[in-house]
Image: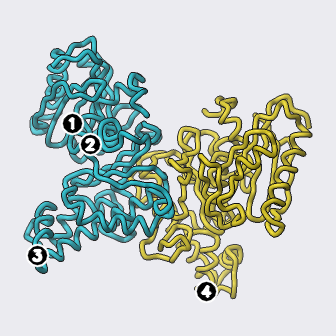
Chain colours: A yellow, B cyan
Amino acid sequence: MVTTNRYSIGVDLGGTNLRAAAIDSDGKQLGKSSGKTNLREGREAVIEDIVLAIRALRDEFGQDKLAGIGVAVPGFIELKKGLIVGSNNLPAFDGFPLRDDLSEKLGKPVILENDANAAALGEKWLGAGQDVNDLVLLTLGTGIGGGIISDGRILHGFVGMAAELGHMTVIPGGNPCGCGNEGCLEKHASATAVASMGRLLHLGDNPTSKDIYQIAMGEGEDAKKARHVFELMGTALGIAIGNLINIFNFPLYLLSGGPLPAWDLFAPAIFREVEKRSFTYRNTKTRIERATLGGEAGLYGAAYLPFQCSGELKRAET
Amino acid sequence: MVTTNRYSIGVDLGGTNLRAAAIDSDGKQLGKSSGKTNLREGREAVIEDIVLAIRALRDEFGQDKLAGIGVAVPGFIELKKGLIVGSNNLPAFDGFPLRDDLSEKLGKPVILENDANAAALGEKWLGAGQDVNDLVLLTLGTGIGGGIISDGRILHGFVGMAAELGHMTVIPGGNPCGCGNEGCLEKHASATAVASMGRLLHLGDNPTSKDIYQIAMGEGEDAKKARHVFELMGTALGIAIGNLINIFNFPLYLLSGGPLPAWDLFAPAIFREVEKRSFTYRNTKTRIERATLGGEAGLYGAAYLPFQCSGELKRAET
């Protein structure tokens, strides 16, 4: 594939998968590579895989048109230092200066970003948020990540730890969380939380959130219980999103992640709660919707970062 | 008083008091007028009082150096239309195009702003937030208002209703609120909420929050009960501020309003809750402090608006 546009390379470094893509300034994916994150072989092996993937794309599409490189990673980012801090999924990278290390090996500036922040930016660029400048994304997975786009840009906070939305307290005294708190949103509404609630209700020995969804789509007592689980999940999400609406008055709140197919089971509880808990929701055209880029959002957002940083894509910020 | 600087006129239109001040670009107060908000005599009388107050200051300090006029009002603001919407304190102004009406009468552009937003901006300009660009202010009064300063500017949301922080749900199923919700922050932590909790504990027939404070500073069973009230207040504030820290990762969270003298009674509960509920708080230098401008914050913030709008005071945005 040949492009006359400038392009950038986005990398999504997950605990399981490592993906890289060359994406041009129109958002067209020129090329892509996907592999596993070989954490077993150590940090250096993973970094080598990242470098090789980026080099392969750069060699294919040319150094001269490469606007830059963005890397999305799970965990907190200390922005100024370019460090990953406290990532459960990438323990070997905890405190490691990944930005500068990659930049040195590639001879090119690298922008490091939290994966949920990158996903929110991706949705704003090419997904469900194209028509707005302000949105909040919640990613439902093992935990719950968050990304906030304010005036077209990621809201970072002063260290880079903003949008830890999975740790909003929705039920004081609720389920205990590894972060030391009780009642965190992610302990009541993540895929893992759905599975846990299912197990408490004896819906299988070690069910996944997908199992609970399958049971909920059936009939009988177990189906009722499984639907109740999604009802509880939606209630927790509704409390959190109601708060976010009262705080931000943004036009768009997006949800993404594994449990999205169960939307019809949990979304009614979200709408019921926000209707009750937010005067702003009741009186403005506020939308709560499914994100549309799925697992690609972070990759696209990572690729968007160099364009935004250089100001090349101002026109995309409507 | 003579100034060689440009100045602006800030107005704080409250449900009880109407104040106006001429403030120069260094933040020096050149002149001020204070009076009552004569709601009984109708909206037009109040508007005439505003216009007279502004004209008096303008005549004193000169039309040529006047940068503009900012007006802080309680209630939601529809920014684009310049309307006050749903103000409990100024029902006569509900839906009234105050911005354009004042602007027409004065022959000068007017900027309308929510009072808590203006107070947050005032604290950023001349108060406790001078050294930061990002802060959240909670004003504790009859209700709880909020103002969010992001990158030196008021965060408005897409309609202008952002920062309704008093209506964050802190205790799902908690005290009922006039907004239709249960467990709103302001029903657990405002001056009114303190008074209500005191009444429930039989600390007087119709105590004010100040009465509860006086009782708490004494001894015996009633003092214990009164201190428990502030403990509950601090707990609710801590849940809310913990969430705000997890959402924004801003360096500074400020509290202002009547109950501030009771700081030592409610602040320990705030710190305990945020310590528990926010990984970000535990790992960053996040400050939770008292605002310093008191009742003047909104007036100063209103005066700052024309300077910021014109870009004259860019240097003040460190």
Residue at 61% over, 74% down: A194
Could you tell me the amino acid type at mark 1? Leu
Look at the numbered discs 2 and 1 and tell me whether their residues touch, using CB distance below 8 Å. yes
Q: Nearer the viewer, mark 4 or mark 1?
A: 1
Q: Name the image quarter holding residue A68.
A: top right
Q: Nearer the viewer, mark 3 or mark 2?
A: 3
Letter of the chain that mark 4 sits on in the rendering? A
Counting from the top left corner in percent of width and height, residue A253 is at: 55, 52
Q: Nearer the viewer, mark 4 or mark 2?
A: 2
Which label belongs to residue A221?
4
Instruction: Return the residue at label 3.
Output: B219
Counting from the top left corner in percent of width and height, residue A134 is at: 54, 43
Look at the numbered discs 4 and 3 and tell me whether their residues touch, using CB distance below 8 Å. no
Which label belongs to residue B13?
1
Q: CA distance from mark 4 to mark 1?
A: 59 Å
Instruction: Return the residue at label 2.
Output: B74
Q: CA distance from mark 1 to mark 3?
A: 40 Å
* Disc with the residue nearer the chain's start (1 vs 3): 1
